[in-house]
Image: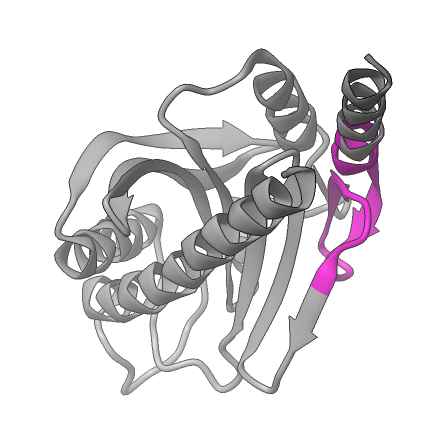
Amino acid sequence: MKQVFLLFSLLFISNNFAQGLENYQIDKNISLRMPQNLEVSDTLQLKTIQGFLGDNVVIITKTIQKDTIVTIESEEDLLKFYEGAQKGFYESLKGKILKKDIINIEGLKILNLNTEVSINDEQKLYENYILFLDNYTYTFSFIHSINEDKNFKIQKEKIISSIKFQKGLNINNQFNHYENSKRATKWGELIGSLFFYTVIVGGIIFLLFRNRKKKHIA
């Protein structure tokens, strides 16, 4: 009986630590609430922020496009960029796209792309939000099992609803004006492929974390 109580206590404590959210500033443009104890990797080309909600993974990436090679001069170009990102992700994925939609948050257009991925013979859902803003591509990804638990769903919705942008940003900040650059669709495909490999790494982390947790409980 004591062992059962101890196991329950450990699970309860672990779950509470994993579920805690705190304010996080990605950069001057974006802030949101994220799980505690984040792991952050910041290189010259890519910034990655990842954390856990229970057994589930939350990953944010920021692709740095200084001296950009993509021209997005209109809403039409922006949608072509998102179309390319979707295509690049799908071609790398070889899986199933469950949902694709353009949503608006505070006047900015964001691609919502939900996919089903098989990793080590386990089916995972990747809920992705892709944003092009001020020459940066941001991705917000939630990686979880097919059967989404209620607590995770609540915390995920809290994170999404907490996304805040710097005052004054609007859809014009999603455009740029550069000559001799690649088509928006083509660059979107490259971003989609890069994004795929990033989230696959996240999926591997998911499995390693879950297996480590199972061994710890055993």
| Quadrant in which the N terminus is drawn | top right
**Left or right for 177, reference 31:** left
**Left or right for 27, reference 117:** right
Q: How is the image coloured?
A: one colour
| 213 within the magenta span | no
Instruction: Say whether residue 139 is visible.
Output: no
Measured from the top left, where is residue 8 in percent x and y?
Answer: 78, 20
Instruction: Say whether residue 10 is visible.
Output: yes
Q: Residue at x 67, y 50 (%)?
A: 51
Q: Residue at x 24, y 78 (%)?
A: 182
Q: Residue at x 32, y 60 (%)?
A: 196
Measured from the top left, where is residue 214 in percent x and y?
Answer: 58, 41
Judge whether 175 appears above or below 104 on screen.
Answer: below
Q: Quadrant of residue 42?
A: bottom right
Closer to the camera in the image, 85 or 17: 17
| Quadrant in which the C terminus is drawn | top right
Q: Residue at x 51, y 55 (%)?
A: 208
Closer to the camera in the image, 180 or 151: 151
**Left or right for 51, reference 117:** right
Segment colored magenta: 15-39
Measured from the top left, where is residue 123 in percent x and y?
Answer: 28, 37
Measured from the top left, where is residue 29 in percent x and y?
Answer: 71, 55
Q: Residue furthest front?
A: 1
Judge whether 11 appears above or below 39 on screen.
Answer: above
